[in-house]
Image (cartoon, grey):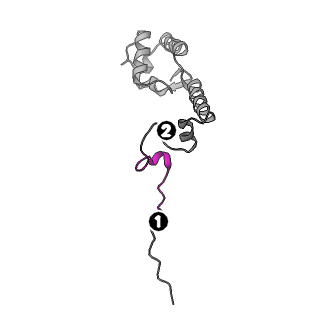
Amino acid sequence: MARIASVVIPNDKQVWVGLTYVYGIGETTSRAILAEAKIEPTTRVKDLTEADEQKINDIIANNYHVEGDLRRLVTNNIKRIKDINSYKGLRHKAKLPVNGQRTRTNARTRKGKAIAVGGTQPKAASKT
């Protein structure tokens, strides 16, 4: 098991796929890192040498924000816009979609389970 940016990468994956397990590294960034390190993207993680792993770790540490640092950065940015009461901050506070998506329909992931309003249900027959 290779450890890259303090994340354990599965051995049986190709290197470009394995790098996407790190928070903040997607497919494009993964391929760019491997091109800079001069490593074939289709090689398996188990076939990487210690030197290759070290090259990848150095490139990520020097050029990219990943894992804890990136999470902290994103959290601080959201906290800042909440504190200054910008429109986006108010949307974050209200737990509503932030980037202009419609909310009349959809937005269920953000708003939660739909609550029925107004309709009356037929009353159960009572014993007399």
Residue visible at 52% across and 26% down? 8
Residue type highlighted by circle 1: Gly
112 w.r.t. 72: above or below: below
Looking at the image, which residue is at 40% across and 24% down? 27
Which of the 4 quarters of the picture holds residue 66? top right
Q: Which mark is residue 42?
A: none
Give the structural element (helix, strand or loop) at label 2. loop
Q: Position of residue 59 (x, y in %)?
A: 50, 12
Residue occupied by mark 1: 118
- Residue in the picture at 51% in, 44% down: 96
Q: Which residues are magenta?
A: 102-116
Label 2 crowd bin: few (<14), some (14–19), many (20+), radius 10 Å: some
Magenta: main secondary structure equals: loop
Q: Was residue 75 drawn as part of the magenta stretch in this picture?
A: no
Q: Secondary structure at mark 1?
A: loop
Q: Are marks 2 and 1 in contact (CB under 8 Å)?
A: no
Tell me residue 32's x, y (percent). 41, 15
Q: Which mark identifies residue 98? A: 2
* View extreme (left): residue: 42
